[in-house]
Amino acid sequence: MILAKVVGTVVASQKNDGIAGGKYLLVRACDTRGREKGEYLVALDLVGSGRGEVVLISQGSSARQTEFTYQKAIDCVIVGIVDRIEEHGQVVFRKEEGR
């Protein structure tokens, strides 16, 4: 899994029937402190995440292992919302209140 931050939404009016009905978000890889780095990806949101949240994403064939994504043209899914990250015994990230 990869840490990423939700930075926007993606709307596609024309989609393959196999992936219709999902919520797609623009995410960007981030470090353990939630600072954006790396590439932007479009991810199917399976957990109800929103803009500004740090999430766990899964890519490639692993992204197609859920009940909703099995054997579908999905390459990136959001599988979790991060509440806290502890690194070397110290909390380095904590989800903001109200999110």
Image: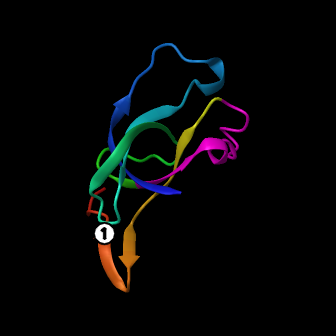
Return the x and y of residue 76 as percentages of the image width and height: 54, 41
| Left or right of 75 in this view: 23 | left
Residue pictured at 41% horizontal, 36% vertical: 25
Q: Is residue 60 above or below residue 1?
A: above
Residue 20 forms part of the magenta stretch: no
Identity of the residue furthest to the front in this view? 38
Q: Quadrant of residue 55?
A: bottom left
Q: Is residue 38 above or below residue 18?
A: below
Return the x and y of residue 4 as percentages of the image width and height: 39, 52
Return the x and y of residue 13 as percentages of the image width and height: 46, 14
Which quadrant is the C terminus positioned in? bottom left
Residue pictured at 30% horizontal, 59% vertical: 34
Which residues, given as a range, are shown in magenta? 55-72
Q: Quadrant of residue 35?
A: bottom left
Q: Is residue 73 above or below residue 44?
A: above
Residue 69 forms part of the magenta stretch: yes
| Left or right of 1 in this view: 86 | left
Kind of residue indicated by mark 1? Arg
Return the x and y of residue 68 as percentages of the image width and height: 66, 39
Identity of the residue furthest to the top in this view? 14
Q: Is residue 35 above or below residue 59?
A: below
Bin the neighbour count of mark 1 within 10 Å (Cα to Cα): few under 14, some 14-19, many 20 and up.
some
> Would you name the residue on which mark 1 appears?
94
| Count of numbered circles in the view | 1
Residue pictured at 70% horizontal, 43% vertical: 67
